Image (tube, rainbow, N blue to C red):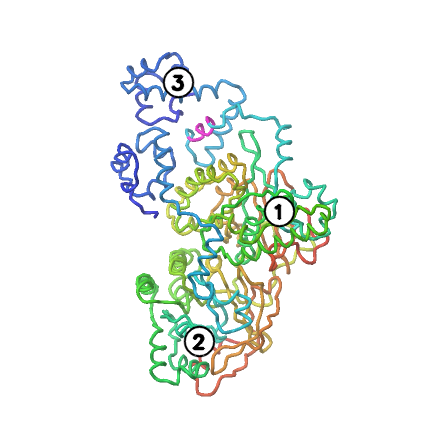
Amino acid sequence: MANKLISEIPLPKSIANVFSARNISTAKDALSLTEFELMELLDVGLTEVRSALSQISEIVAPPYQTALSLMEQRFQNEHLGGHFPTGLKGLDAALCGGIPFGVLTELVGPAGIGKTQFCLKLSLLASLPTNYGGLDGRVIYIDVESKFSSRRLLEIGLRSFPEIFQMKEMAQEMAGRILVLRPTSLAEFTQSLEQIKVSLLQNQVKMLVIDSMAALVSGEHEQGARRQQTLSWHISFIKSLAEFSRIPVVVTNQVRSRNHDDASRYSFQVQSRDGAIETPMQYDSHLVAALGIQWAHAVTTRLVLEAKSGERFIKVAKSPISPPLAFPFHITSSGISLLSDDGKEVMGPEINAIHCQGSFPQTLDAGHNEIMNFGMEGLH
Amino acid sequence: MEIWRLPISASQRGKLISAGYTSLSSLSSISSSSDLARELKVSESEAMNILKVASHSRGSETSNASCSIVEGIYRFSSIIEFSCRQASLYLVKFNLSRAQSAWDMLHDEESLMHITTSSADLDNILGGGIHCKEVTEIGWSSLSLIVNSVLKYKLTTAFGSESIIFMLIGGVPGIGKTQLGIQIAVNVQIPNDFGGLGGKAVYIDTEGSFMVERAFQIAEACIEDMSEYNRFLRKDFQECKIKMLPQDILENIFYFRICSYTEQIALINYLDKFLSEHKDVKVIVVDSVTFHFRQDFDDMALRTRVLSGMALKLMNLAKRFSLAVVLLNQVTTKHTEASFQLALALGDSWSHTCTNRIVLYWNGNERYAYIDKSPSLRSASAAYSVTARGIRNSSSSCKRIKMM
């Protein structure tokens, strides 16, 4: 609506002509100026400008919905009330049924913790027919780091849903629904995002996975302001993709070590150092999410995958509906699964900390070298 | 006052000046609009309009009090890069008949209704505890859920009229900004019998982070709290039953989803009309005011102008319809004195526009709210927690409030 042409808005003829004569052709142009700038530019009186602006505004402003109609609509039109079950019962319960539609869900964690495993499992689930808890649709998997393994995908399928995947045609159809894109640069990624927008409408796509967002950006730019700027377009584009097609979007994010210049406090906190309550934000972990604070504002749900004293945990670090719960998990040949469905509530700075202590147990069957190999060196 | 400050179009101004009218007083000698029309070679209605505008401005100029206001506004306007003429326009709107003495203002402020945050500590530092004495006396605080106290934010405008409520809340991702926004949209609907406002809410969602399931949970908890209150304190008032359902609460939240900054500006222009049709709206929550302005702008000066224009319009709405405006803001990192610190997004000139500012932050294991800027409240911080039922007092808080 923002780029609506002024000529399509039923303004009085005389003023519509003035707008077009001054080359103000869209609502965006008109609304980006203040009333006085417009008076100056169009050479008309204040009352005319005001009434024209209010007419334009009324048309451009989106209609409202009451929260009630919003809820009813979600429950009527959407499978499972707008949540996609992950199959991890405890996590699903915490998230009101699973990964929410229409918003971004982020997986962040150290290398080798199981982010890709989780993504594989999710895309497999989404491709399944609804009576198996799936979304019965296509999945677009943007595999930036070339980690997608179709062999592993089929293995997870075979172990978790043998009745489907033992039939060759069915297995073929399920796997055929998962489309993998492998952009090698940010420009290519941008291009494929734009193509996805079209295919989301045509192809019955029910889920979008991006693994990983950070790899794209960190590969090309040095840290700091430039990176934020390059990303901001992508952030808002992906958000709007999720929103208008109402599908779950899962994005992974890497970790990096904390820089000395990473801010974690406000100026007023630094000043009041005398107080006893003032505790310095001391994390025992030195890892932070690779994409910065602007990205973190944009994701609606953040799940942290971490390793602590030899166990792996999945932690709901940011969610509008769930308290910060941590669930122990492990990865088997049938994919990621929770060891316990009762989450342990975490507190304070622990919520956002990302731990990576000790080596995590390798409960994978032998013969999955591609999984064993990736990214285990950086751990200590 | 000079002609160029009049809110009229450029060509009209040009004609006036070339006809020799350079000051307002020179216009005052003109007795009829047809004279002026002939002299300027414009239509009679146009001339009439010019005279109307001129007499308006003159009216406000002749009184001493407003003179100083004029000065004040012009100084203010130069700070926020506003055209002087725009400021004079606002002056025309707030002409002197609405002036009020400080004493009257105090009375007005005391009669203002407040919206609770559902966290007693938070309300307390926001100046809430004072105005609901009777409620605290009847053991409200022992219930540990304060449905009644106050989230009060006053904006005493330069024009010296009634106070309105205008605040900005910022915090790191996951601290609970959206939660607080939803909580306020629900709490504004607490009926008058329970010390609430009984109003409706406009929720402007720019990020798509509003979760209707969560709003339902919070609404449910809010109704439970009210019936609890009923049982404890109003045994004799049988008729005062809760007839509300969570559905009713959701029904009264008007949700707007904004996808670009143009839509945001358009909506705020349109709200004027919307609110005159929905007079019972008592709060506007914008979550977050900054999101689109952080993505789409290259021209920073334009951004500042558009933002301050928007802020002025919001203040205007708050004033005209006497409602509360709650803006949620993101944080960003800022480099000062050789170190990086967290700061609210959108820069310094934007922070001038907001009268009250709260920053939410982590302190140890608890979430804290800190009053960063306010003309009437002392700087303080209080712990709060986000529970399944919404925003509540921090669980371990007895003497948590810390005045600074």
Residue B312 magenta-drawn? Answer: no
Q: Is residue B334 left or right of residue B240?
A: left
- Residue type, mark 2 in image: Tyr
Q: Disc 1 designates what residue?
A: B116
Q: Position of residue B4 (x, y in %)?
A: 38, 24
Rounded to the nearest angstrom, the CA distance separating label 2 from label 1 is 45 Å
Residue sitting nearer the eye, B334 or B206: B206
Within-10-Å neighbours for mark 2: few <14, some 14–19, many 20+? few
Bounds of the magenta segment = B86-92
- Kindly identify which chain the residue marked by label 3 belongs to: B
Question: Which tag, 3 or 1, sits closer to the chain's start?
Answer: 3
Q: Mark 3: which amino acid?
A: Ser
Q: Mark 2 highlights which residue?
A: A132
Residue A367 spot, x, y in % from top left: 44, 87
Does residue A314 appear to the left or right of A21 in the view shown? Answer: right
Q: Which structural element holds mark 1?
A: loop
Look at label 1 and name its amino acid: Thr
Q: Residue furthest bottom?
A: A366
> Could you say where residue A309 lies in the image, as x and y percent from the top left?
60, 76
**Residue located at (36% from left, 44% from top):** A60
For label 3, the SS is loop
State which mark lies toward you, 3 or 1: 1
Q: Which residue is mark 3?
A: B23
Q: For numbered disc 2, what is the local secondary structure?
A: helix
- Residue A255 in view in this figure: no
Based on the displayed image, in which of its 4 quarters is residue B375 positioned?
top right
Local crowd size for mark 3, using a 10 Å CA cut-off: few (<14), some (14–19), many (≥20): some
